[in-house]
Every structure is written in structure tokens, then in C-alpha cells.
Amino acid sequence: MSTSVTQSTRAPELRVRPVEAADLGQVIAIDAEVTGLEKTDYWYELFHRYGGGRTRQRLFLVAEAGNAIHGFIIGEVRDWEFGSAPCGWVFGLSVRPDARLAGVGGRMLEAICDGFRHAGVAKVRTMLARDNSLVLSFFRSQGMMAAPFIPLEMDLE
Amino acid sequence: MKLQKGTSLALYSVLEFAANPGRQLSAAEIAEKYGASTHHLAKVLRELGRAGLVESARGVGGGYRFSGNARRLTLMDVIELFEDISTRTGESDEFDASSDVGRALGAVMAEVDEIAKATFRSITVDTMLKLIERQRRAAADKQAPPA
């Protein structure tokens, strides 16, 4: 899960649309600024799989104002994982630090939820680190509650 | 994880005040609503006042009102004014760590505590007020006769 977000008052003239190849430089820069890691290959691969509105099941959206990309959100519809009815999954969300507190995160979440509804699902989920209070608070503020699932992991030796 | 009575009263109070930002509420009103003694609640409100989360209002009847930032203040911020749960783990609190069984049970309790703390850290007063409103609307919809 990419880090960092926002909420609150509406940003004027903000448009949320499917990512285009020309946006990738700014997307990579936002992610690098927020996470401290530049993952160029990862983002090109993700664009290949999720970009350009290839399917209704996969969504990679950006928030644009003027010529600047202010943030991005990525998700997909996942079917019947461990018996869960198909639902929307948000697995990446980030807003440029200097564009926060202007409603960018909320607008992108609304847009991807519209996409999920269009794909026929009625539930959206996400998962992120429990020490990521900023993004957790954002999703909470949008009405998300704990899901009836527990993430598990173990070290592979 | 169980919160102390004073901590619960602080959460009730902060949410009552934040839900009624323009209104002065007396300690007696809140104490009566949540079945607490006025004396205990007054101590809680003094602590909230020292932290800048409520301020006492002058004038007829007196009372208190919310003076915090509802969009920034988390449940954990309020809780930590009254008890230190940030370092609490099930391992130290509830089971004897001198045995294998106690240590394993402690590890499970520590998992539960970590999730609880992350939840308290991620929920602001503003988010709580939205949740309260959603629940109120859902309850009203349930009670409304079918059209």
C-alpha cells in the first residue's frame, strides 16, 4: 500500500481520470517523495497491468489539476478470495505532500468506488500497515470500518 | 484491552462536547447521561481543560464547551491523557511470562492490544461524530414504518 493521503475541503478544478503513460513520471515522483524509494520498473509494470482503463475490473486513476498530477489511486475487483463475495480492493493511494488537505484523497476514493460500482460490486476494502496512522485515519474518515478478515503472515525460512 | 472508568468518561465527554460545539454542557448533564458521579466527571473535565480540549464557559449556569481540533484529535490522544496504553502489551499485563504457556498466551494478547492501539490512533473525533450520525440514521431507518 502506498502511503499518505488527505481529506477535507473540496479542491477546485480537480479532475480524476484514468492514468496515461505520460503521467507515469509524476506518479513515480510522488511515490518516491512519499516512500523514499524510486520504483520505476514497478510502476511501468503496474501501468501495463492496470493502466489505460483496460478492464472494468482494474482501475488506476490519477487526480489532475492544471498540468500537475496531485495523486493516484489503484485498485481492482477481487473475486471469491477465501469465500469473500466479489469486492473492490484499493491497494495503492498517495497524494503529493504539498497537495494534501484539499480533498484530493476523498475525490479519488469516490471515483474508484464509482468504478467498482460500475463493475457490479457493493463493497470496498483495503489493507495497510497498522502504524500508518495517516492513511488509516483517512480511510476511517471516509467511513471505512474494520473488515471481518484478519491479515496473517509468517517468516519463510 | 479494558479502559479505566475515567478514560471512558473522558471519551464520552469529548464526544458530547464536540457534537455540540456551540452549546455549553454542564458536568452534571454528562454525569447523569453516563451514570457517573459529578465529582468524578469534574476531575476528568479538569484534565481535559488542562490539555486544551475543553474550556469552561462563564455566564449563567456555566458549563464547558469543546476547544480541540476534532479533525486532528484522535481517540488515542484522549486516552493517553488518562492512562498509558502505548506501552501496554498482553505479555506484561495478564499472563505469567515465566512459563512457556504464559509467554504464548501473552503473545496472543499482545496481538490484540496492538490492533486496539492502532484503531484508537486512527480514529479522530470528527470520524467518531460521523459514525455516531450514521448509526443514528440507521437506527431511525429501522424504526421507520415501511412506506
Image (cartoon, grey):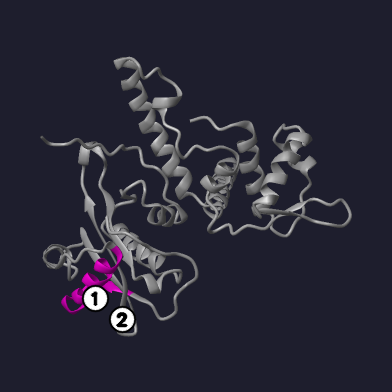
Residue A105 location (% of width, % of height): 38, 65
Q: Mark 2 falls on what kind of element?
A: strand
- How far apart are the alpha carbons under marks 1 and 2? 8 Å
- The amino acid type of the residue labelled 1 equals Gln
Q: Mark 1 falls on what kind of element?
A: helix
Mark 2 or mark 1, which is nearer the start of the sequence?
A: 1
Q: Is residue B84 above or below residue A99?
A: above
How packed mark 2 is, by other alpha carbons closer than 10 Å (few <14, some 14-19, many 20 or more), is few
Q: Is residue A130 visible?
A: yes
Is the magenta region chiefly helix, strand or loop?
helix
Q: Which residue is depicted at the point 33% across and 21% down?
A: B103
Q: Which residue is depicted at the point 45% across and 64% down?
A: A7
Q: Is residue A150 above or below residue A102?
A: above
Residue occupying the far right of the picture? B60
- The amino acid type of the residue labelled 2 equals Ala
Does the segment drawn in magenta span residue B79?
A: no
Q: In the rendered view, does B77 fall on the left or right side of A107?
A: right
Does the segment drawn in magenta span residue A28?
A: yes
The answer to which quarter of the image holds residue A147 is top left
Q: In the rendered view, does A101 fall on the left or right side of A147?
A: right
First to last magenta residue range: A16-34
